[in-house]
Amino acid sequence: MAECRTLFAQKLHDYGAAWRIMRPSSITDQIFIKANRIRSLETKGVSLVGEGIRPEFIGIVNYALIGLIQLELGYSDKADSMSAEEALACYDRHAEATLQLMLRKNHDYDEAWRSMRVSSYTDLILMKIFRTKQIESLEGGTLVSEGIDANYMDMMNYAVFGLIKLTFGEDGERLPQD
């Protein structure tokens, strides 16, 4: 998460909070692009752009947090004056809430994620994206399902699990990075 936050802060420096103009549906599509690229790389085994899977998982983490911020604050119709400090405070608050959800689920599921493949996280993220798109089409009017925020949190946690596995492998040994 520190690596994800550092990149988010660097992009805030370079671009400001330009993402404040994005509607949640556009954020969902950005996450889809990243998850779809991961799946493509997993299937094809080669990248012609030269970037691997790891940066895409980082992007999913950061876009999921942006999505949570946008759900909380609403999107802006013009350039937003949110300061880097305000954006990082929102980022940290939602990251902590998502971590707490993950810890509760890890307790109940007995850390089953540790026995899963990275490709399964990718598929679960894609499934959550399609669920989110359906909820967006229903304008949030679900009967029994969790909301968009819960789906963003799950996507983020699956991406974090992917990053952990890509960093430490199956046996917990740190792996060389691409």
Image: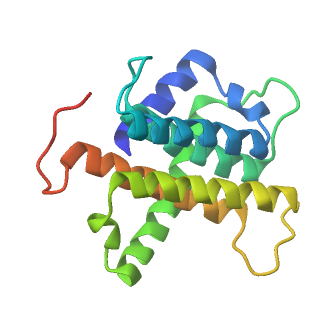
- Left or right: residue 45 versus residue 168 is right
Viewer-proximal residue, 143 or 43? 43
Q: Is residue 90 visible?
A: no
Q: Which residue is at a point 77% across and 48% down the rendered structure image?
A: 73
Q: In this picture, is 149 found above or below 48?
A: below
Number of numbered discs on residues: 0
User: Splitting the image into 4 quarters, where does residue 89 fall?
Assistant: top right
Q: Is residue 172 visible?
A: yes
Q: Which residue is at a point 73% across and 46% down the rendered structure image?
A: 70
Q: How is the image coloured?
A: rainbow
- Left or right: residue 30 versus residue 62 is right
Q: Which residue is at a point 42% across and 40% down the rendered structure image?
A: 43
Q: Which residue is at a point 29% across and 50% down the rendered structure image?
A: 164
Across and down, in percent, residue 45 comes to 35, 33
- Left or right: residue 1 versus residue 87 is left
Viewer-proximal residue, 31 or 65? 31
Across and down, in percent, residue 112 comes to 33, 73
Across and down, in percent, residue 174 comes to 14, 44
Q: In this picture, is 16 found above or below 87?
A: above
Across and down, in percent, residue 171 comes to 13, 57
Q: Quadrant of the C terminus?
A: top left
